[in-house]
Amino acid sequence: MTYKFKRESEEGLIVVIVEIDYKFELKMILDTGATNTTIDSNALYLLGYDLKDSVGDVEIETANGIITTKIFELNSFSSLGLIEEKFPIQVYDFIAHGIYSDYDGLLGLDFLKGTKFCIDLNENTISIS
């Protein structure tokens, strides 16, 4: 399977569309340096999730130090032709921590586990097998 992606500039971020619960689409950045997928808590709230329903907390190391995120289990999460049911996702309040972005989160390597993928920056495609 090969999927086209959008880049904001020649050296820009890789923007992918994700779908949550088979009905909500969000724009996320594919981050091959991120171990786990993370979504902005404000986006999750707007999708109808109750922020009190997290299944736990986890501390993660970022470029800016260690932070605590909530963990939610999404009913379904899909992107790039892959679908994960009951997908655990990290949730972090971007705005409360001074992160202002046009994107709803980061698609991490946890979503791509068990796949072989190739990112072609000349053609702006991702091939998954």
Image: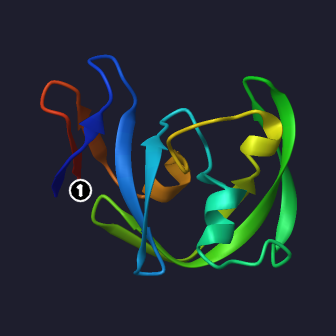
Q: Position of residue 9 (x, y in %)?
A: 30, 21
Residue 86, image x, y percentages: 58, 80
Identify which amino acid the numbered label 1 is placed on: Ser
Identity of the residue furthest to the top in this view: 11
Q: Is residue 113 visible?
A: no
Residue at image location 41% in from the left, 80% down from the top: 23
What residue is at 69 percent from the left and 59 percent from the top?
42
Q: Position of residue 11 (x, y in %)?
A: 33, 17
Residue 80: x and y, percent?
30, 58
Toward which corner of the image does residue 71 lie, by quadrant?
A: bottom right
Nearer-the-camera pick, 28 or 107: 28
Residue at 81% x, 74% y is: 55
Q: Let me know if residue 20 appears in the view.
A: yes
In the rendered image, which quarter contains the C terminus? bottom left
**Residue displayed at 62% across by 69% down:** 46
Q: Quadrant of the N terminus?
A: bottom left
Q: How many labels were placed on the picture?
A: 1
Q: In the figure, is residue 9 to the left or right of 55?
A: left
89 vs 32: above or below: below
- Dot 1, crowdedness within 10 Å: few (<14), some or many (≥20)? few
| Left or right of residue 3: residue 86 | right
* Corner quadrant of residue 43: bottom right
Give the residue furthest to the left: 123
Residue 51 vs 31, above or below: the answer is: below
Q: How is the image coloured?
A: rainbow
Q: Which residue is label 1 attached to?
A: 129
Q: Is the residue 78 above or below the residue 129 in the image?
A: below
Residue 117 quadrant: top left
As helix, strand or loop, the secondary structure at mark 1 comes to loop
Left or right of 18, for residue 36: right
